[in-house]
Image (tube, rainbow, N blue to C red):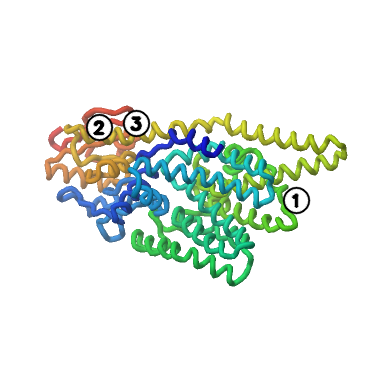
Amino acid sequence: MLVSYVRWLGPAVSPYAGGSDSSGYLWSARLFREGRLSVRISPPQRFPVDATGTAVLAPLGGAMRPETMDLVPTYPTGLPLHIAAASLFLDEERAVRTVLLFAVAGALWLLYLIGRDAGLPRVWAAAGSGMLACSPLFLFSAVQPASDILATFWGEAAVLCAWRSRRRPALAWLAGGSLGIATLVRPTNLILILPVLAALTPSAGTCVRLAGGGLTFAAFVLAYQSWAYGGPLRSGYGSVSSLFAWGALLPSLSHYLRWGPQLASWLVVFAPAAAWLWRGDLARWRLVGAAWILATFGTYAFYAVTAETWWYMRYVLPGFPILIVAGLAGLRVTVHAAASRAGRPWAARASGAVACAVVIVSAGALLRSPSFAEHRAVKPRERVYRDAVAVMGDDAALPHPVLMSQLSGAANYYRPGNQLIRFDLLTAEGWRAVREWQRRERLPIGAALFGFERNGLFSRPDFVPPCEWQPRGHYLDVTFWGCPPPGRQ
């Protein structure tokens, strides 16, 4: 069944560099494959960098290393390293597909194993994997080059290995290694140390093994972030602490309540009842489950972006496995308790039928969700970026350098060396400097814009002197423009 699911999902997987996430990850993977960590940026001749700042020369998915003209990837190294490793044996597009589908299959299989270890019978554990497989959020994340599914897979592996190390202590090494790789994929995954510690046997030897497995990866993350971004606790977005704020808490909690049942299934309402199933040898799962949910949902409750739209729930996707397992455990104990109170011979048989019906209805609700079909639009939407960059590059009439924003990451990936300027990062002073530079150099500039970006460039009142933009062509919703230097309009 798992193989069939992966085969069904395969054609929907997008290997293309599109928006900032996919273009940044794929460009980073290419750098690793080529044995590089950065690229030197050469501004156009006599370009007024002092007035504009160097950030305007960095595409989406890229950032300038502090005090250098070196361009480094914005995003964490974990997913690019996986893709780069696969690229040693496959071409780039197949490598991307292989890594994404491996992460999908692995995440579903590990959820099944976690369900079994958490006391669920085989059919119930398989139902948990089915729930995750049907999640609109899981599917949406599975078909594009992004870190969410891979972060979920390695987080599951860390907790599962930690739990099983209670019987086989050597698995604590794998728990540490899995947690370390999870941190490479997404540095905030370090907070998964909470459920990992909860699952371990508390002893000095176990903690030493855990640390031994993860320290190499942790050291790499800290060293890379220091080199690339100017500090061990800085990311491509800036200081990690600046990304989280108390003001995001209430909107995020409201967002969880609205979208959690729609994306992880309505079974999550039974999750608190799992405490009655997790007793005896399974009692430890109460602590593991609580720590896991707190680590994922609690951390990103303070991240303002989480509440912006439904698919930003992808940040808490690594917490979905335990939420689903707890929901199934709670459902099972609830229907069995109801059957016991009924005290009738038929009640036990009926309880199984009721539980089965609830699971089927919950899965059906996921499949009928308006968000379920969103994964089908990802591939054609991402492909537009590649094709638009090709059209832009083939149009000899399009002036260079080119003002762009949304298309900049794909342009950097498919046509490295393009002279691009991020108009969304230009200040009024920077725009005046660019126009003066145009006048001095007698050089036209171009623009490549999606429909929603045109007003952002053409209608800014602070962009003085304005430009009389001349259309140069289009590809679907992407339009190309030319701006002659001042005095030649």
What element does badge 2 sit on? Answer: helix
Q: Quadrant of residue 410?
A: top left
Cα separation, mark 1 vs mark 3, equals 54 Å
Hey, what amino acid is under mark 1?
Trp
Whether the residues at callouts 1 and 3 have beta carbons within 8 Å, the answer is no
* Residue 220 screen position, x and y as percent: 40, 63
What element does badge 1 sit on? Answer: helix
* Residue 82 screen position, x and y as percent: 40, 51
Which mark is drawn over residue 276? 1
Depth check, mark 2 against mark 3: the one in front is 2
Quarter of the rendering occupied by the C terminus: top left
Q: Quadrant of residue 208?
A: bottom right
Number of other residues with Cα within 10 Å of mark 1, as a class: few under 14, some 14 to 19, many 20 or more: some
Cα separation, mark 2 vs mark 3, equals 16 Å
Hey, what amino acid is under mark 3?
Gly
Q: Earlier in the sequence, mark 2 or mark 3?
A: 2
**Nearest the eye: 174 or 415:** 174
* Residue 339 screen position, x and y as percent: 82, 40
Q: Earlier in the sequence, mark 1 or mark 2?
A: 1
Image point 47% across, 40% down: which residue?
A: 142
Residue 24 seen in the figure: no
Q: Which residue is mark 2?
A: 391
338 vs 203, left or right, is right
